Amino acid sequence: MIFSKRCLHALRAVLYLGVQPPEREFVPIREISQKLDIPFHFLTKILKELADQGFIISSRGAAGGIQLAKPTSELNVKEIIESIEGEDYFSGCILGFSKCDNDNPCALHDRWVAIKAEIQMMLGEEHLESLADRIKTQGLRLLEI
Amino acid sequence: MIFSKRCLHALRAVLYLGVQPPEREFVPIREISQKLDIPFHFLTKILKELADQGFIISSRGAAGGIQLAKPTSELNVKEIIESIEGEDYFSGCILGFSKCDNDNPCALHDRWVAIKAEIQMMLGEEHLESLADRIKTQGLRLLEI
DNA sequence: TTTAATTAAGACAAAATGGTCTGATTTAAG
DNA sequence: CTTAAATCAGACCATTTTGTCTTAATTAAA
């Protein structure tokens, strides 16, 4: 699998927030956990990371929950993934070397550079807004069947 | 990191075999382990998997070791990766769902299909032959600095 | 002010991955 | 036949990732 469980849970949770009607304020983590079948406490920890990074806002107490920190047009898939997997997830060396660049390329550097650029472009352009639209209009799923 | 340690070790070991002079027969795993700084017993297990899958041939006893099972022109990076990470590593669902296709797409399916195709094409075209050539002529490295 | 509903925090457990060690088996060569 | 060099096999340990549990802190509303 390309992404860690933490990352998949984070992505699905954020997409879930993205498809909520705009009038909704805070969404309880319990609801997301149940709707998406993600372990509650595990999800809580993951979402805390996203909150710390400024992607979502949380509110304690009754009527509390979480909420996207920005409009969906200003959030994209790539930054969510990077916030969980690490900044260099898509920019690092394919052979795992810490120092790998044009001056000191690993054996697969050239080819990987091109692929990385593709991935980053496509995921970086994918804003939550258009995604949420397509999820709603086309009935795309956030759940295992 | 995109790939597991097992996969990175496998890739580097196979590339190491690819750049050996053609007259060399069996290369001892101990040598690869030392040259590439990969734990010996761990590497042995990984290479046994590659042998079981038919990518390399092994020979026990004195003067034994391992050897590529096919000419470098018939081996590519993609199949090595898939043999370790699993057949569907590049073809599976980005959200980790087991059933995800055009008839029942997940929320990210469309976009991911395009990226997957890019990756598979680029890695599938990368045969060990050309790679080994470039590694030798351009001094590309298989080692952390 | 009490209560119920919520996130936050941190200890702990389970599972997966990464790695080590010992000994058995095989093989070439002296 | 013996020995040395190698892979093979499997038990074991360490680390990381994933997940559970309990309790504390916070907040809205009765």
Image (tube, coloured by chain):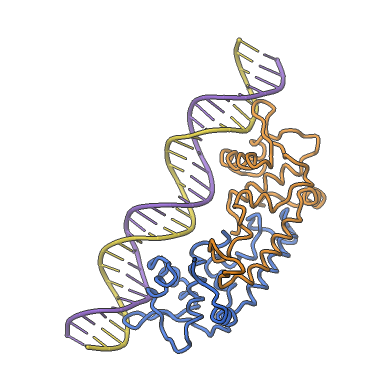
Chain colours: A blue, B orange, C purple, D yellow
Measured as percent of width and height from the top left, residue A22 is found at 48, 88
Q: Is residue B68 above or below residue A102?
A: above
Quarter assignment of residue B122: bottom right
Image-based side of C8 in relation to A115, left or right? left
Q: Is residue B2 above or below residue B52?
A: below
Image-based side of B20 in relation to B86, left or right? right
Q: Is residue C7 above or below residue B35?
A: below
Measured as percent of width and height from the top left, residue B123 is found at 72, 57
Image-based side of B51 in relation to C21, left or right? right
Image-based side of A83 in relation to A90, left or right? left
Measured as percent of width and height from the top left, residue B41 is found at 56, 38
Residue A75 visible here: no
The residue lying at 59 percent from left, 59 percent from top is: B1
- In terms of depth relative to the viewer, which is nearer, B107 or B132? B107
* Residue that extends furthest to the front in the rendered view of this protein: B103
Q: How many marks?
A: 0
Quarter assignment of residue D25: bottom left
